[in-house]
Image: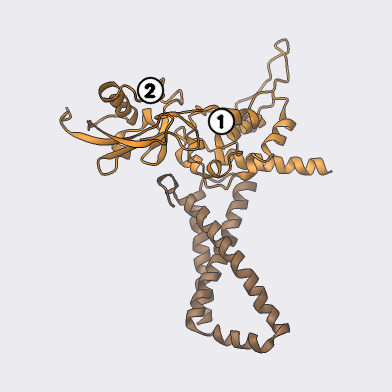
Amino acid sequence: MADETQTMTVSIWREDGDDGRFEKYEVPARENQTVLDVVAYVQQHIDPTLSYRFACRVGMCGSCAMMVNGSPRWTCRTHVSKVVADDCLEVAPLRNLPVIKDLATDMDPFFEKWVAAEAVFHPSKTRHDPMAAITPDDPMRIAASEAIECINCAVCYAACDVVESNPDYFGPAALNRSWSLVNDIRDDGQDVRLAAVGSNGGCHNCHSQQGCVQYCPNELNPTLSIAGLKRETTKALFRRSR
Amino acid sequence: MIRPHRTHPLWFAFLLHRLSGLGLALFLPTHFYMLSLAISAPARLDGFLRFTDLTIVKLAEYGLVFLLAAHLFGGLRLMALEFLPWSSHQKTMAALAVALAFLVSTLFFLKAI
């Protein structure tokens, strides 16, 4: 059993309607603990006013993403031992999103961009029609499957420098979802979707830095999805000009 | 500033592409201006060409050719990424672009000195 007397320093961002600053806390340096465990320890044992967001604690819900030592991580599945540097840990709210309080960010701009990118399903049939027959080996089904396991954690959104420099950019997650719908033969909104993802905030802003791929906790590839959207919007341009 | 979330090879490939593009954007107008001297002021061009024989200028040209080659091969890598079927070897492609740029620019340098 680990020695409970050993401690480590964690710097946590505190902000409540002011400019915000890092505050240091001494927490037990346990052999086996996640970053979320450390944040929860501070809230439960040191300062109950610390605000942060979590739900499932097993990497399903996408609620607990934060900046850990400067990189976006899902904190419930990030072991402290993998990211600690010189016995120090720095935890901050996700980049590129407004802070509500401390480590909790306002996710509204993130999800509003999903709607702006037409990352919503447009049904082509009613419940009275027969179900669409899609085989597992259908190339479009395979392409959709590769993009479908997003948990909406906004880690990619925080990793993206284009989101930082262009507030209109929809970001990797919204465009990744749009790409999964471009590959959904049941969807009836492809023209409006391609117009949306080809607009000012759309896929052509992407600089292919691939930070989204680097940090996606579910190992998705939004750059691949965005490249697909770039191809489809280019094809649509030629279709329109004929 | 290179912040922690940027410390991965493909971000550095982006940085090289951006810096080489900016470097070439600054170089090309100067390059065309010097070429125009062949018509407007041949004597000044001859003087400048003698200046380019200096080793330090050859070294600077080595850098310029590296930037040009890095931007060319890096640009091909990005076009392949966007318009060809996805390859899972993105980091290898970026390393290959830099290696080719070194090869081309070093061959140029060896020929120049």
Which residue is label 2 attached to?
A57
Q: Residue placed farthest to the bottom in the image?
A: B43
| Residue A195 visible | yes
Which residue is label 1 attached to?
A109
Q: Residue placed farthest to the front in the image?
A: A18
What secondary structure is found at the residue carrying circle 1?
A: helix
Q: Which chain is brown?
A: B
Give the numbered dot on residue B15.
Answer: none
* Amino acid type, mark 2: Arg
Q: Nearer the viewer, residue A35 or A122?
A: A35
Do tags 2 and 1 sit on the same chain?
A: yes
**Residue drawn where x is 25% and y is 40% of the image:** A87
CA separation, marks 2 and 1?
A: 24 Å
Q: Residue placed farthest to the top in the image?
A: A128
Nearer the camera: disc 2 or disc 1: 1
The image shows residue B45 at horizontal and vertical percentages of 64, 85
Which chain contains the residue that carries disc 2? A
* Amino acid type, mark 1: Pro
Q: Residues within 10 Å of mark 2 (few under 14, many from 20)?
A: some
Q: Residues within 10 Å of mark 1 (few under 14, many from 20)?
A: some
